[in-house]
Image: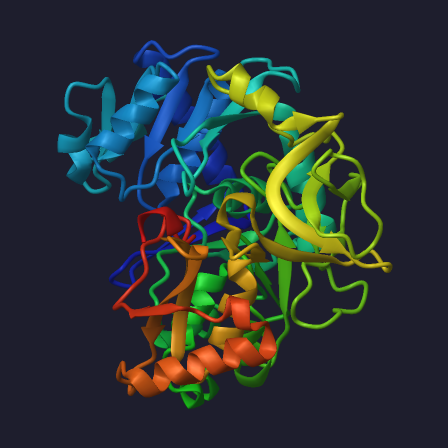
Amino acid sequence: MDERALLYVDRLGREESWSYKDLDYMSNRVANLLKSHGIKKGDRVFVYLDRSPETYFFILGIFKIGAIYCPLFPSFGPDAVRERFSDCQGSLIVAEAKLSENVEGLPSILVDREGEFRRRLLSMSEDFESVKMSKEDYAIIHYTSGTTGKPKGAVHCHGAIMSHWKTSKDIVGLRPGLKCWFTADPAWVTGTSYGILGSLSTGADILVAEPGYRMNQVLGLLDKYKIEIWYTAPTLLRMLMREDPAKAKEYDLSHLKKIFSAGEALNPEVCRWAEDNLGLTVYNHWFQTETGSIIIGYDGTFPKKGYDTMGKVLVDVEAEILDDNFNPMPPGGKGHLALKPSWPSMFLNYWGNPEKYAEKFKNGWYITGDLAYKDEEGYFYYLSREDDVINTAGHLVTPFEVESVLMSHPSVAEVAVKGMPDKLMGEAVKAFVVLKSGYEPGPQLEIEYRSLVRNRVSPFASPQEIEFMDELPKTETGKIIRRIL
């Protein structure tokens, strides 16, 4: 219990170290604080905090008192906060003091780390007898990121920790004392499932820090704190690709054993860049808010087959590709990625929305909403979200395929592809491009982009329209929001 659990580094570089014993005592104090606010088993407690030790104190304290943890991104505005709080009849919201205006009128605890809150927390007893819970009891409500519509509250139970622990140990490779950094915000399923629960359940040594988007802010931390496992997202890697790759050689990453990525499709160009400049393969993982833990990907025990594969099923779950009648397809068939229920971390419902939950299941399969195909060796290949497929003159075009080709052009830092209404073709392919520094928008680049896609994908996939942008709209988890482009 005396081993370090967290090393917190704030934006000014100041450090705080917390042991597993510290977490136990501080979460007991949180449970007593929540009890003083009338919180009881089954109540929904929202956590609206920056990345900090307090986030860890509160999730454990919420579990100990038997309440349900409901994370929120600290960049959410008042409307997003109130929509979610109202949706599941929240009982309390724990918020950064600087965000007090966003929670005005809601029952709240305001957190200021150097003021009244910390003094009040330390005044609470460090003894607390945890409420007895069953593995079926509700533990977490994770709201979906809402890239295609209104966010829904995916409910997970206490038994999910078995999936988090096992996949963290067997797939990610976490163990007691291993130094790891999960750049996902705790409000994202990866941040909760692996940055908090999986890491703590394996006894790992967790770096808690706000990642920037520059090499000195990311690679600098990996170097300084001798991180062994780095779990991040493609967006962050693509942001690093904007800089001079020679800068990566300025950092000592010899201690870094593995890089994992999740949350969105991993472009082949990102993998090549990491191998060339960081000296490591990026291992892709696929899972969702609803699945709660890793399902498909790589764990290093079998060969990585090219740069465009999702990997294989890594857990005891049956995954298949289904046709439009929801029947399994032979290898190579392109269709709906589906999973056979159930596993410990699978969501149990959408809070207050059983109709939407029921819509996710067909012929005994959970329909993920992703399109993919599988080869004869069991490797899966991502195509797109079902809602994103472009039908242009009767030809189906997947945005990810076009985006991956455009990412291979040396001028492209980020790109999003979307279908736009077209009177002649039904939908036209449009590319939204963010350029790397040193490049200027112009007709010549547009010609090169169209030629590249025409030659490597098909003439129908070549963008009819190209728009240059300073940045792409994203969810808090870094996923591109195509519906507002």
- Name the one closer to the observer, 53 or 195: 195
Q: Across the whole image, how many numbered discs are drawn on residues?
A: 0
Instruction: Please indicate, yes or no, whether residue 331 appears anywhere in the rendered image.
Output: yes
- Name the one closer to the observer, 115 or 445: 445
Q: Is residue 126 left or right of residue 319?
A: left
**Residue at the image point whose x is 64% and y is 70% from the top:** 257
Quadrant for the N terminus, please. top right
Q: Position of residue 463 (x, y in %)?
A: 43, 69
Residue 108 to residue 255: above or below: above
Q: Position of residue 55 (x, y in %)?
A: 39, 38
- Name the one closer to the observer, 350 or 103: 350
Q: Is residue 364 left or right of residue 115?
A: right
Quadrant for the C terminus, please. bottom left
**Residue at the image point whose x is 68% and y is 37% from the top:** 163
Residue 239 to residue 68: above or below: below
Q: Position of residue 123 (x, y in %)?
A: 29, 25
**Residue at the image point whose x is 42% and y is 49% from the top:** 477
Q: In the image as oriented, which residue stretches furthest toward the bottom?
A: 246
Instruction: Please indicate, yes or no, whether residue 295 appears anywhere in the rendered image.
Output: no
